[in-house]
Image (tube, rainbow, N blue to C red):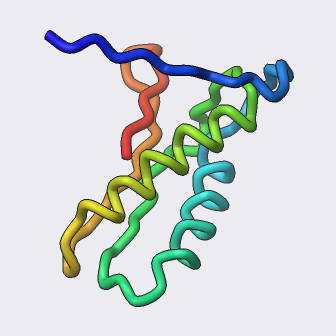
């Protein structure tokens, strides 16, 4: 089984509580603007009470990368769902 390593360059260490719905809404809008010419639907399904505590910049880079990867690998006519929900006392985020 392959081993994956991530080389994280931490640019800040400002952990904060982030409400995911507005955070993801803004991020999805940024990605939509960069998808010019693509015929892919990007749908946000987030409940308003989902929060995480972490560095905002790190979260932005990770989630933007996942969404952009999904856009690049989804054929025209496809749909990408970005979900954030609370389930069994855990926060779940999935692009």
Side (left or right) of 9 relative to 16: left
Question: Across the whole image, how many numbered discs are drawn on residues?
Answer: 0
Side (left or right) of 28 relative to 38: right
Q: Residue at x 69, y 38 (%)?
A: 19
Q: Residue at x 74, y 37 (%)?
A: 57
- Where 53 falls versus 21 (above or below)? above
- Where 69 falls versus 4 (above or below)? below
Q: Name which quarter of the figure residue 93 lies in.
A: top left
Residue 44: horizontal and vertical position, in percent?
45, 58
- Where 17 falls versus 35 (above or below)? above
- Where 58 falls versus 32 (above or below)? above
Quadrant of image for the N terminus: top left
Residue 74: horizontal and vertical position, in percent?
23, 65
Residue 10: horizontal and vertical position, in percent?
74, 23
Q: Residue at x 52, y 43 (%)?
A: 63
Residue 72: horizontal and vertical position, in percent?
33, 64
Looking at the image, the residue that sits furthest to the left is 1
Q: Residue at x 67, y 53 (%)?
A: 22
Q: Name which quarter of the figure residue 52 lies in.
A: top right
Q: Nearer the viewer, residue 22 or 9?
A: 9
Q: Nearer the viewer, residue 23 or 65?
A: 65
Q: Nearer the viewer, residue 43 or 35?
A: 35
Side (left or right) of 80 relative to 37: left
């Amino acid at each position: 089984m392959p081993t994956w390593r991530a080389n994280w360059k931490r640019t800040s260490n400002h952990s904060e509580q982030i409400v995911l719905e507005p955070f993801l809404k803004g991020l999805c809008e940024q990605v939509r603007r960069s998808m010019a010419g693509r015929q892919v639907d990007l749908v946000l399904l987030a409940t308003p009470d989902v929060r995480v505590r972490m560095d905002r910049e790190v979260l932005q880079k990770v989630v933007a990368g996942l969404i952009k990867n999904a856009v690049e690998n989804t054929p025209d006519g496809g749909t990408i769902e970005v979900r954030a929900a609370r389930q069994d006392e855990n926060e779940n985020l999935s692009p």
